[in-house]
Amino acid sequence: MVEGPRSDRIHLVKLRCELNGGQVEEEIPDHELLIDFLRERLGLTGTKMSCEVQVCGACTVLVDGNPVSSCCMLAADVDGHSVLTIEGLRDLPEYVTLERAFLNHAATQCGFCTPGFMLTSAALMASGAPRTRRERSEALSGNLCRCTGYSVILDAVEEAVGAYDEN
């Protein structure tokens, strides 16, 4: 325990996880959110904070390959797990395929939601499902975009999945 300025005690916990292919070991407050750990402590600012209530998808990261909202998950909950952020996705083959497709379809405008959409799409590509446009649309429904509308994003995901499946 550490004395803190706003409370009498801060409980620290040890966090060990794989992050973007490397190992991380930190001592963190037990109440620290995953998004704050990533952005503030580690400087990984590609993950965005928006709604803070798990409905917009801007804060999406992959934990053990599954999309999760980092704004509502404690950092301590990823202890012993694998975490992938948009910064780590850049090192994977899925990234180039997704980037090309998003550019081809002008699927970004302000770009704020793009990391969440790309990580969710990468999870879809890696899982091999869903196969229909409607199923893909439903899988992306946890990600919101206020600029583009969804058809161009879905077109980009369709192209990326098709190109990924060919390889």
Image (cartoon, grey):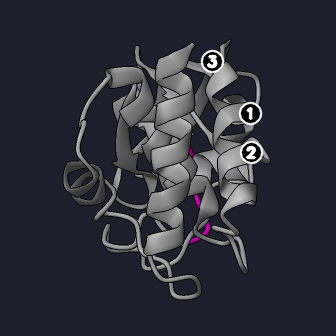
> What residue did someone put label 3 on?
25
Earlier-in-chain disc, 1 versus 3: 3
Earlier-in-chain disc, 2 versus 3: 3
| Mark 2 crowdedness (10 Å alpha carbons): few <14, some 14-19, many ≥20 | some
Which region of the structure is painted magenta?
Answer: 2-6
Seen in the picture, residue 137 relative to 164 is either above or below; the reply is: below
Disc 2 to disc 3, C-alpha distance: 34 Å
Q: Which mark is residue 96?
A: 1
Name the residue type under label 1.
Val
Q: Position of residue 151 (x, y in %)?
A: 44, 72
Disc 1 to disc 3, C-alpha distance: 29 Å
Residue visible at 49% across and 78% down in the picture:
145
Q: Secondary structure at mark 1?
A: helix
Q: Is residue 62 left or right of residue 99?
A: left
> What residue did someone put label 2 on?
100
Residue visible at 67% across and 34% down in the picture:
97
User: Is residue 130 found inside the magenta-colored segment of the image?
Assistant: no
Seen in the picture, residue 11 relative to 77 is either above or below; the reply is: below
The picture quadrant where one finds residue 156 is: bottom right
Name the residue type under label 2.
Arg
Q: Position of residue 28 (x, y in %)?
A: 55, 37
